[in-house]
Image (cartoon, helix red, strand yellow):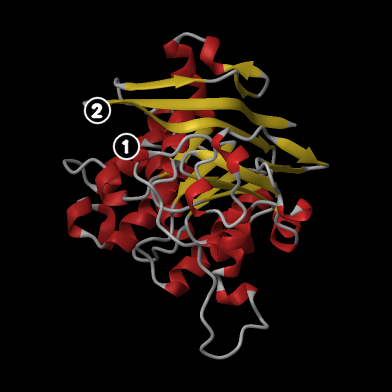
Amino acid sequence: MQLLDIRNLTLELETPEGIIRAVDRVNLSLKEGEIRGLVGESGSGKSLIAKAIMGVLHERWRISADRFSWCGEDLMRLPYNKQRQIISRDIAMIYQEPSRSMDPTANIGEQLTESIPTHLLDGPWWQRAYARKKRAIALLHKVGIRDHLAVWNSYPYQLSEGVCQKISIAMAIAKNPKLLIADEPTTALESTTQAQLFRLLASFNQLKGTSILLISHELETVARNTDSLSVLYCGQLVEAGDTETLLKEPLHPYTNALIKSVPEFQPELAFKQQLYALHGSIPTLQHLPIGCRLGPRCPNARKECVKTPLPERVQNHHFSCHFPLSKV
């Protein structure tokens, strides 16, 4: 079953310099039980897409899409209150900076119990406070916080970023969402805790059937923990498909450059040999090139690249490039 189906998502920002198109006609879909990765450099628009899905947008942001479907229902055509009702019930998000996404005036116990919906509690109404606290403690244990008393009455500023990240994960899974968006969930965690987190997400996906959108700039991490992959560059979707197929046979020069820049994907790389890298740097939003935004850095760029490439498809492999690698 198709949960999320977005076609030609465009997000424009109003700035003193004029309108900036930060996300340019991006397509994204998620099936029930699927784990999809969304990877790209910092500033490529990954978090903006996540916020668009959650409906967390600034008043100066303009969002448009040919289709923004959730479980067959177009959210763009629904009243705002109805949108919020569906999103708050079915979609949860783990934010990139957990300590900033939590309420600094409420302790952890209050925030966690508040995130548990009433319909998930068993027993009569006069026992709901006890049932809510019991479930909240179980959530803390599930995300790896064994001593819940140490954090229950604490405030976010009193805890480390790693502990706050675990708590934000507990708050996100408290309502058993159909879709869990994880925006750079391992940024503040040590390696052992990162592995624990991914095991937790995998078990939640397998046992509950929860779909997961994993957002990161680390291709290796995303590739190891996802079924499918979408690659962004400067707000444009350059390639998407099954993770295994995309890593073995990338069709877009940017995806190929990402793979070559990761030592783990280059077993034949000699000792102290220089890693592959595209020349130049990612442009700022105020100075985006016309057409294909990779053009000034692309080794295969030609005069046709001043026009935005149309999406093409080879079976389940999608790409947007005038000169894909298989034809060069």
Q: Is residue 173 above or below residue 52?
A: below
Residue labelled with disc 1 = 286
Residue furthest to the front: 303
Q: Is residue 314 left or right of residue 38?
A: right
Q: Quadrant of residue 314?
A: top right
Quadrant placement of the N terminus: top right
Task: Tell whether label 2 touches label 1 (CB within 8 Å).
Answer: yes
Residue 93 in sight in this render: yes
Outermost bottom residue = 271
SS at badge 2: loop
> Residue at point 66% right, 43% down?
321
Front residue (pair 259, 119): 259
Badge number at residue 118: none
Mark 1 to mark 2 CA distance (whole Å): 8 Å
Q: What is the x, y in percent for residue 3?
A: 66, 31
Question: Which of the two residues, 234 or 169, is positioned nearer the viewer here?
Answer: 234
Q: Residue at x 45, y 29 (%)?
A: 52
x 22%, y 52%: residue: 156
Up-down relation of residue 83 to residue 156 (above or below): above
Residue matched to label 2: 17
Q: Earlier in the sequence, mark 1 or mark 2?
A: 2
Query: SS of the residue at dot 1?
Result: helix
Q: Amino acid at mark 1?
A: Gln
Report x, y in % for residue 248.
74, 63
Q: Position of residue 113 (x, y in %)?
A: 35, 40
